[in-house]
Image: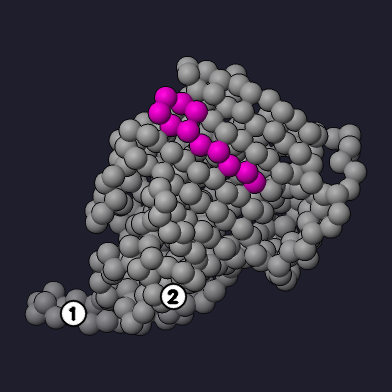
Amino acid sequence: MRKFRAAFAVFLVFLIVVSISGCLGGEKVKEKASSVIESQIEEQTSSEESYTTPTEETTTGGGGYTTESPTETETGEYASWANPWDAYNSVEIDGQSYLISYVKYRLRIRTEEGGPIYEYEVEKKRGPAKIHVYGMKINMETGEQEKTDLGEFDVYEYYGKITPINGKDMNTTFEFKIWVKQRTEDSDLFFLFPTLEFATIYYNLYAGSGNAVGVWIKYGDKEFAFYSPTAVGEMSVAPYQEGDLNMFSDIPDIEDMYVGWYSMYYFGFWSALAEEDIYHATQDSWGIMGWQYNYEINPDGTITLGGKDFKVSNVKWNYSFGGATGQGEATIAANLPIPIEAKGVFIEQQSGTNVFMHIKIEELGFEKL
C-alpha cells in the first residue's frame, strides 16, 4: 500500500514538472520553486515516522570520508532509509544521538541534452549565534525614517555558501544567513538540501512568522539584509531592510540548481527504500497505472565520514512513465538521512527536458545530543 502511495505521489509531481518545463526564466523559477516546495511541506508534515527529539547540544568535528573494504552485512536486524533529508530529528551512531550541523557537497548539474556539466561546492552549517537586530524608527509627524540598532540577541543561524568551480554564469561566491529565534521542524526543512534555502528566505521575509528574525544575502559586491524587530519583542519600530532582493536575478545558476535538484529529489528511489532492508542484497520491480520501477540494492562495505563509521549500500534504479524515463544510483547508510553520493538523470520526451544531477558529500559535522 505504501508503494502505491509513493507511486501516485511521484505521478502527481511528474505532472507538475512537465507542466512547468521550459518556463525557466525570471519569475517563473520562483513559481516552480513554490510548487515543489509546497508539495515537500505536505510530504514532511504527513510523515508517519517518529524520532527522538534533540535536547542537549555539544559540537563535534567534521571532516571528509574514506572507504574500507566490504564487511559482513548480515546483521540480523532490519534497516531501512525511512525519512530521507530529515534535518530536524537526530541520527543514531554507535548508540549515541547526533544532529547533523555541517555538510559540504560537491554538486554537478546539466540541464539540457548534450549540454555542459557545471560544478559547484555547497556548504551548509547551523547553530546558535549572536547578532545585532535593526529596526526602522519612524517619526509619524514628519515621516522621517532612521535605522536603529536594537541591541544584540541570541538566535539560531543557518548559514550557506555556494562556490562556483565551473559555473555557468556565476563567477563569485554566494552566501546567505537565516536567523530564527529557535530551531524548529519548519526552519530545518531545507537545511540538508544541496541548494539555497529559497523558500525559507521568503517565509522569513513575507510569512510573518514570529520565529523569523532576519535574513542576510551576499553575492559579489551586492548585499541584502532584512530584520524583524517584532521577533525579538520590539513592537515600537518597523522592520528594517537594506539592499535589493532582486539580486537573485543576477544569479541564474541558482535556478539551474533547483531544476537539477528537484528532478533528482522527486524522481529518485527514496520512497521505495522506506520498505526495504538496505543491508541485504535485493532486486525487484513494481509498477502501477503505467508506472514501472526497477531497482537493486547491494551492501557495499563501510565508509568513514566526519569521523564516524557508516555501513553503506549501493542502490541503482530506473523507471518509466509515459514519455518520461530516468535512472540513477546512490550510496546510502541507514542511519544517515542524506545519501553519501547520488546521481541521476530525468528525461521527458515531449517537453525535451533532460536533466542530470550529481551530489557527493565531501565533509560532514555532528553535534552530540
Instruction: Point out residue 171 in the picture as x, y percentages from the top left corner.
Output: 39, 75
Dot 1 amino acid type: Gln
Task: Give the residue displayed 51% in from the left and 37% down from the top.
Answer: 326
Residue 128, quarter of the rendered image: bottom right
Q: Position of residue 259 (x, y in %)?
A: 40, 50
| Residue 173 badge | 2
Name the residue located 65 percent from the left edge and 31 percent from the top edge.
Answer: 295
Colouring style: one colour
Disc 2 element: loop
Q: Residue at x 35, y 68 (%)?
A: 169
Question: Which corner quadrant of the image does residue 360 belong to?
Answer: bottom right
Quadrant where the C terminus is found in the figure:
bottom right
* Residue plotted at (42% across, 72% down): 174
Question: Where's residue 286, x and y in %?
Answer: 60, 21
Q: Mark on residue 195? A: none
Type of amino acid under label 2? Thr
Q: How far apart are the two marked residues, 2 and 1, measured between alpha carbons?
A: 33 Å
Q: Is residue 101 inside the magenta stretch? A: no
- Upstream in the sequence, badge 2 or badge 1? 1
Q: Residues within 10 Å of mark 1 (few under 14, many from 20)?
A: few
Q: Which span of residues is magenta-colored? A: 320-330
Q: Quadrant of the N terminus?
A: top right
Q: Tell us which disc is closer to us: 2 or 1.
A: 2
Q: Is residue 343 left or right of residue 354?
A: right
- Which mark, residue 145? 1
